[in-house]
Image: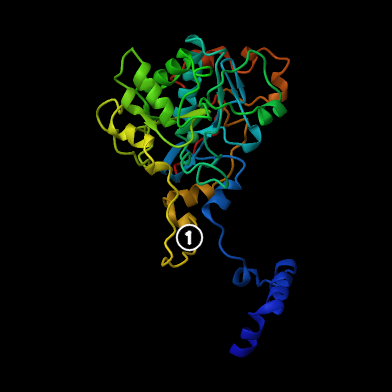
Amino acid sequence: MTSSFARYSTGWAARAFIAAALILPLGLEPALSAEPQTAKQLFGGMTLPSRTAPASLGSYAKGCLSGAVALPADGPTWQAMRLSRNRRWGNPHMIAFLERFSRDAAEIGWGSGILLGDISQPRGGPMLTGHASHQIGLDADIWFQPKPARPMSVAERENKPFVSMLDKTKFLTVNPERWTPTHARLVMRAAAEPEVDRVFVNPAIKKKLCETWTGDRTSMGKIRPIYGHDEHFHIRIKCPADSPGCKPQAAVAPGDGCDKSLAWWFTQEPWAKPKPNPNAKPVKPRFVMLSDLPQACSGVLAAPSSSEAASTFGGAVPVSASVPAAPDAIMPPAAIADPSVPVPTRRPSAGSAP
Ligand SMILES: [Zn+2]
């Protein structure tokens, strides 16, 4: 018995047997199924949000999102980019914030509004590509390029190149031909919003703000230097009160952050290649599994799907329809006028949070 199983468990015979089991309805699949999927495979494979009450579960870099709402691809003061990534999903508080912030951006002279990068996947969670955070619908990337007045096509949104704010011929230096006072106003405006927890930018950009910002510096400390983030900035909002399962980050240190912690970025240390340790044992990479996330995330994954139309802020409009239409047609003015209603107009009946 044992020996015959051992024979099957090695080499081509085992593979053939497993292949046959997967193809033929032998009823043996559970015992022979492939390795469990990683959390990023599970969450990266979801195309629609869960039909459950909105909630951010877990922490920014280890969690998931229940009852997500999508920001429409187009609005009066925003356009979402890279639509194929399907990462326009957020906690309803984040979606309401972005709608508001996009209007503020247009108001301070940032073109006709913002270009939106990634928020989260339909059910949040880890992603197959990019981002350690963005897992609970409370992180959003905003391009350092304003929204053009005309709606871009799907292909343009897919292919429009990023533009760095740095002069790449120098070490960690903002390009003065690209960075303008309006860029600074936009970032400072985001940081000043009470629900914003942190704003991530490249260290060179933080330095530039430290050196040139003459207005109110109360929120300067929320602007945190980090690798990358030279062609977009990243807004993180606080755990909303109605998401008790959301794990907040420690508060930022007091002060404006224009100090030693910033100066460190301009030393060799953050940019040095890690020295290989010849004595280190090769470590088998350990992937994040569903069991590593808050338990409620299993429920989010297993919950029935909501439809895109039902879970889009103001109702879904296909991006192609936006080309001839006036932007106002996309979101009813009533929905814009009342930012206290952060949920879509046609919301599914919400079940209890998983
Ligand atoms: Zn980001």
Q: Return the x and y of residue 35 as percentages of the image width and height.
A: 58, 65
Toward the front, the furthest residue is 169
Give residue 245's quadrant in the image.
top left
Q: Return the x and y of residue 214 as percentages of the image width and height.
A: 33, 12
Above or below, 59 against 330 in this view is below
**Going by the image, does 262 lie left or right of 162?**
left
Badge 1 marks a residue whose secondary structure is loop
Q: Return the x and y of residue 263 as percentages of the image width and height.
A: 33, 33
Which residue type carries mark 1?
Arg
Q: Is mark 1 within 8 Å of ligand 1?
A: no
Above or below, 75 against 264 in this view is above
Q: How many marks?
A: 1
Q: Return the x and y of residue 196 as percentages of the image width and height.
A: 38, 27
| Of 283 and 346, the residue lying toward us | 283
Residue receiving disc 1: 286
Give residue 116's quadrant in the image.
top right
Q: Is residue 1 visible?
A: no
| Of 211 and 304, the residue lying toward us | 211
Toward the left, the furthest residue is 254
Determine the residue positioned at 59% across, 31% down.
Answer: 310
